[in-house]
Amino acid sequence: MDDNNKSHRDKSRGARPARPPPSPAPQPPVLSCSVLLTKYNDMLDKYPLKTKMCTSFVVSAFGSALGSYLSSLDGKKSPNQVVGRSRQPRIDWVEVFSYAIHGGLINAPISHYWFEWLSAHGPDSETKSVLVDQLVVQPPLLVLMFTCLDVIRASLKAATSQFLEAGVVSKALSNAAPAVVASWRFWPFVVFFSFKKLKRKYWTVSLNLASVIWTVYLSRRGSIEE
């Protein structure tokens, strides 16, 4: 009798469903080259001009940085190197930003619209299209490139020297401290009034109108200090 009860209990226990094995934890997606190229191609389709500008900015900066570094290894003097300074492996950041700005903001838009026009209205033959591009367009583009690079270099050098000589950071910190205290006497009331009395869509308009008074105050304060 006891053996029969035991076998009955064993059968009832065996009838319970087995627990499923735990599912593996999800793995983060792997960014392979094919995935990156697919995403980049999608960006080219959705935002062609912006993508080309960003690409040209990064590629021009990288190429200029690599060329500047290799030139310093060869012992060649950079056009922006200070006279008398020892030649060490370094990157000329003025050159890097000059090429990056030209590549991203000037060359990329021109090339984008030029190749779009050439594809739609240019010669049917690829050979003739290459000849038109290289003989008609590239020479003035090179003149424009060197002109823009000289202008950008001069502007960056002037801005850098002026920034260092004028003590912009220390002057900004000394001016910001009293301005912060003055802003606490004005902006909390303006913001509270806008939040309390106006609809959300009018908040930015209200703050922009109030900024007229604030800008007048800052301008008068700066003129008096000078």
Image (cartoon, rainbow, N blue to C red):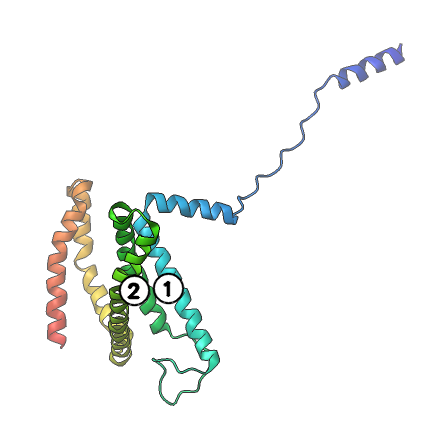
**As shown in the figure, which amino acid type bears the numbered disc 2?**
His
Vertical relation: 38 (above or below) 75? above
Residue 148, percent across and down? Answer: 25, 69
Front in this rendered view, residue 33 or 20: 33
Name the residue carrying label 1.
Answer: 60
- Secondary structure of the residue carrying tag 1 is helix
- Secondary structure of the residue carrying tag 2 is helix
- Quarter of the rendering occupied by the C terminus: bottom left
- Quarter of the rendering occupied by the N terminus: top right
Front in this rendered view, residue 126 or 83: 126
Name the residue carrying label 2.
Answer: 102
Q: Are the residues tagged 2 and 1 within 8 Å (C-beta)?
A: yes
Q: Is residue 78 left or right of residue 116?
A: right
Distance of mark 2 from mark 1, alpha carbons? Answer: 8 Å
**As shown in the figure, which amino acid type bears the numbered disc 1?**
Ser
Residue 62, percent across and down? Answer: 41, 65
